[in-house]
Image: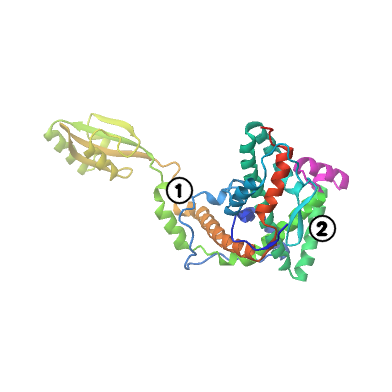
Amino acid sequence: MAMTHGTRMMGRWCMVAVLAWPTSMALAQGLLEPVPPAEDAPAADVPADVPPDAADVPVEDMPPSAVAEEAAERAAAAVADDPGDRTRHTMDGMIGQVNGRPIYARRVLEPVRDQLTAMSRQLSRNEFRQDAARLIAGQLDQIVTDALVLGAAERDLTEQERMGLRHMVRQRREQLLRQHGQGSLAVAERQLQDTTGMGLDDTLEAYRQEVIVQRYLHRRLFPQINVTRRDIRRYYQDRYEQFNPQGERMIELIRTGEADESQRIADALAEGVLFADASDEVRQLAAPGEAPLAHDALNEALAELAQGEHAGPIEAGDAYWFIRVAEVDQQGARSLRDAQLEIENLLRGQQFRTLSEQYRRDLFAEGSYNPIDEMTASLLEIAMSRYAPSE
């Protein structure tokens, strides 16, 4: 199996997930140093086409990467479509490596076993081969990326930080034993396995890796993230209607067909008479939307009125009209103060993705790993043998 140093392709970077990882314990132990809030300075460029809620998209819902898609296409074309074929690989066999660490078939296929089984019931053999190749290539892309990042993060640790990390893992172990086993190792193992699918050792290793990667990104990428108050204000102003949806208005209308009566009402309002007392015929109605009234002139006047304001007389149709906004239900409207933390987190997430994609390209250029399309082809042979329908 050929080896490659780097790759010309790039794929999904699953490390968006670390944005949600807890850092309080690591910060308390001094393994991480907090980054001060950004002051008013030029903001880093962020992609304009990132949707407003992109920062909250789970990793597993992110779109497939270019490397995964291209690897899937080549692997599907390379694997013979013959139900009688027998794969050269087994679930326990090694199908490649990343940074000198083996990747076993079971590690890639076991997490997607249920998906492969469901696909085999719904798809033809050829459709299964195409979809399974994409699923497997995506899994491999994530595994390789995680391994490259973890390797770089571990190499960056100082000896003092390694000692601090060991202390944190011991504390975490004691916490898990108390929380899941009341001090009993056997009980904790059983409960963790039942609730998370991982034993104590695997749970601690996942925690150790989480802290290492978070610390590494915190030092390498987070200091480059800079969101200023100007950035937040500009984002809010550019999306003002999104944060301030049009509320439902309750309006009051006076209609008269006589010019003299119209003038009398106008004089009364000018003298401070309440709108409701200016005429014996004041109608109230809800006015949802931008143009709720039958006459354009009334809608245009209404658009200029705030709560408590009135306009008139307005000639429309065969009558004179007076209109007042009695009440506006602004439920859902949010001021800049209310929305600023959400906007700041969103913009930080956008900048993090931009920086992380560049960093990922650097990792793939420097890392050592088997070509993803070759590993995908080996795994696809196993999947075709174990899960694919006969026709």
Residue 184 seen by the camera: no
Q: Which mark is residue 170?
A: 2
Q: Which mark is residue 283?
A: none
Earlier sequence position, callout 1 versus callout 2? 2
The region drawn magenta spans 179-199
Query: In this view, which residue lies farthest toward the left?
Result: 260
Q: Position of residue 387 (x, y in %)?
A: 71, 37
Three-letter residue code for mark 1: Arg
Q: Position of residue 235 (x, y in %)?
A: 44, 56
| Image position of 335 (left or right of 19) | left
| Image position of 9 (left or right of 308) | right
Q: What residue is drawn where x is 44% and y is 51%?
A: 335
| Image position of 7 (left or right of 341) | right
| Image position of 303 (left or right of 81) | left
Q: Are marks 1 and 2 in contact (CB under 8 Å)?
A: no
Q: Image height check: is 147 above or below 262?
A: below
**Label 1's element?**
loop
Mark 1 vs mark 2: in front:
2
Residue 299 covered by magenta stretch? no
Three-letter residue code for mark 2: Arg
Using the rendered view, name the quadrant where residue 225 is placed: bottom right
Q: Which mark is residue 334?
A: 1
Residue 191 covered by magenta stretch? yes
Q: Which of these two is toward me, 38 or 219? A: 219
**Label 2's element?**
helix
Q: Image height check: is 12 above or below 118?
A: below
Q: Quadrant of the N terminus?
A: bottom right
Q: Which of these two is toward me, 305 or 115? A: 115
Q: Residues within 10 Å of mark 2 (few under 14, many from 20)?
A: few
Using the rendered view, name the quadrant where residue 121 is placed: top right
Q: Which of these two is toward me, 107 or 205? A: 107
Instruction: Decide whether the magenta segment is chiefly helix, strand or loop.
Output: helix
